[in-house]
Structures are given as C-alpha cells and as structure tokens.
Amino acid sequence: MTKADSVKPFKSGESLAFRISESDREHLQMDTTTEFEKIISPDGQEITFRKLGAVRPNILKLANSQYDQHADLMKRLEKL
C-alpha cells in the first residue's frame, strides 16, 4: 500500500531536509544506519528514496570464493 503525506522541507545547516515520522521509521524498520538510494526524476518533480538492503554475508562469501577460484582470470581482467 502506498501512503501519501504532505511534508515541507526545513533548513539544516546549508541543506534542506525532510522529517521522517516515528511511525514511518517503524514501518520502514530504519534507524540512522539505514542507507537509501536517492532517485530524482528527469523532470525534477519527484524524489524517490529506495531502501538499500544489507549485503548478505553468504553472497559475499560466495563471491569471494569465486574470485579466489578464478584468480588467474581476474588478474588478466585487471590488465585490460
């Protein structure tokens, strides 16, 4: 379900910022360490923030394993 609220930016140092309500923070399961991707539409009328998921340790382990297994190929690719 999409939720639309009207918000106004406020001055924070040299920047403008938007507040995120406690209920929205809870719904997003976010805190100050949560990272988002910011997407601005080409016409400048929309800003979308997409929550970035944490890297799953098993995926990182698999990628490192593949890199190690093919280290010779990786070295050749680095020289391209």
Image (cartoon, grey):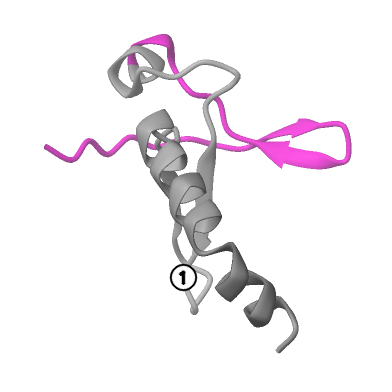
Q: Does 60 appear above or below 28?
A: below
Q: Residue at x 54, y 53 (%)?
A: 68
Q: Does 46 appear above or below 80?
A: above
In the image shown, does 54 or 23 lie closer to the viewer? 54
Name the amino acid type tagged 1: Ser
Among all residues in the image, which is located at the extreme bottom? Answer: 80
> Residue 50 appears at what percent x and percent y?
41, 46
In the image shown, does 76 or 3 lie closer to the viewer? 76
Which of the 4 image quadrants contains residue 75? Answer: bottom right
In the image shown, does 77 or 15 lie closer to the viewer? 77
Residue 52 in view here: no
Instruction: Quadrant for the C terminus, please.
Output: bottom right
Q: How many marks?
A: 1
Among all residues in the image, which is located at the extreme right? Answer: 14
> Residue 54 appears at what percent x and percent y?
44, 32
Q: Residue at x 63, y 80 (%)?
A: 77
72 displayed left or right of 50: right
Which of the 4 image quadrants contains residue 16? Answer: top right
Dominant secondary structure of the residues highlighted in magenta in the image = loop
Residue 41 in view here: yes
Q: Does 62 appear above or below 73?
A: above
Q: Which residues are magenta?
A: 1-23
Disc 1 is placed on an element classified as loop
Q: Residue at x 44, y 55 (%)?
A: 66
The residue identified by callout 1 is: 41
Q: Find out whether residue 7 is within the magenta segment.
A: yes
> Residue 41 appears at what percent x and percent y?
46, 70
Q: Find out whether residue 33 is within the magenta segment.
A: no
Instruction: Quadrant for the N terminus, please.
Output: top left
